[in-house]
Image: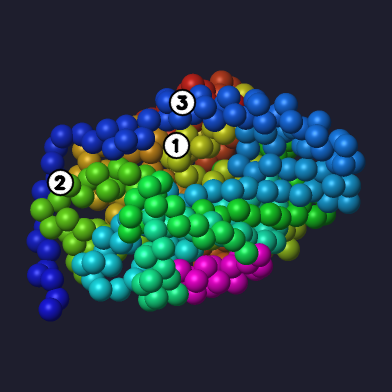
Amino acid sequence: MQPPAPMPTDPDPTPLSYEQAGVNYALIDPLKVSAQRAAAATAPQLLQHGFSELAASRGESAYVVDLGPFYLASIVECLGSKAIVADEMAQLTGRSWYDAIAQDTIAMAVNDLITVGATPLVVQAYWAAGGSDWFADADRAQALVAGWKAACERCGVAWGGGETPALAGIVEAGRIDLAAACTGLVNPKQRLSLGERLGPGDAIVLLDSSGIHANGLSLARKLVERLPQGWLTEVQPGLSYGAALLAPTLLYSPVTEALWRAGITPHYSANITGHGWRKLLRHAKTLSYRIHTLPPVTPVLDFIRRHAGQDDREAYSTLNMGAGFALFVAAADAERTVAVAQAQGVGARVAGVVESGPKQLRIEPLDLTFADDALQLR
């Protein structure tokens, strides 16, 4: 029997922040900085092997090592709590959503790796279940396998292997923690994009997102407690909140590879994940980023903003708000960059410009400014 059609609900006016949902970057980020500094002290270990790190990659989305004829880039990322939404929706709809969840996990790693100009080559899987029983659901397990393989094929990467531990007592029973590691090459070396060419006059091209992607799910799951029809509350006619959240994260590597073939090398790139649009401030240079054109906000993100009672500052500092990836390119390449992305089936627009001035992000249509201290990852 099909569940009854959900009825619309009016937003609860009480604001709900990401911190109230259990994620406080003010506590998390200092550990990241501490770990980053300790990790940097291990760089001399590479010298005994005849290699060296690119120190400028410390604090970026992927780590880069100079191997001589080319650079090696690597990254590890986890999915986060989006698998919980898939589990809840499976109970309500009777279908597995793990094919999409697999793409989300790979996208978390691949979309970080390509920010430094790397071509993804190999993905490794880490699937840690709360017990061996998780793997007994053959439909769910095979959906994960099939989705993982399909996402690898879309990115043009090999699936090298992985680890599937059963961690009873660490991972909650009935749940799974998904992560992916990705390795790639910057070859030729001219493809390297660590921001050394980033400067005033560069255009900011924003690539559309498909929805919430895999960041902000703690907030999205907390919000469901307010919805009378829960996950089945309609975001728009025929689209439930749960299904909208489970739209898979876009894979942007086909765009970056197509840009290279078109002769366009971004001066810098940013994967808009945790910290929302504050990620546009990621590079260490003192520059101002002025946004003059906004992408359309996907319906599920607008729904979250309204029902969580968030103002623009909270929403844009937490969620991707319609922009999943940022490319900073020479002004002369801006329109071609948009055309290349669109040819790969990804919406794009020239959204802003890099300017001289204090380090800040100015989102003009919203009269919103994020200063240098809005993002502290170094």
Residue 106 visible somewhere in the drawing: no
Badge number at residue 226: 2
74 lies above or below 359 = below
Badge 1 amino acid = His
The magenta stretch is 144-160
Badge 2 amino acid = Arg
Q: Earlier in the sequence, mark 2 or mark 1?
A: 2
- Tag 1 secondary structure: loop
Q: Which residue is mark 1?
A: 275
Q: In terms of image quadrants, where is residue 61?
A: top right
Badge number at residue 96: none
- Does the stretch in magenta take in 26? no
Circles 2, 3 touching at the beta carbon (< 8 Å) = no
Q: Earlier in the sequence, mark 2 or mark 3?
A: 2
Seen in the image, is 87 located left or right of residue 251? Answer: left
Q: Which residue is mark 3?
A: 374
Badge 3 amino acid = Ala
Separation of marks 2 and 1 at Cα, in angstroms: 24 Å
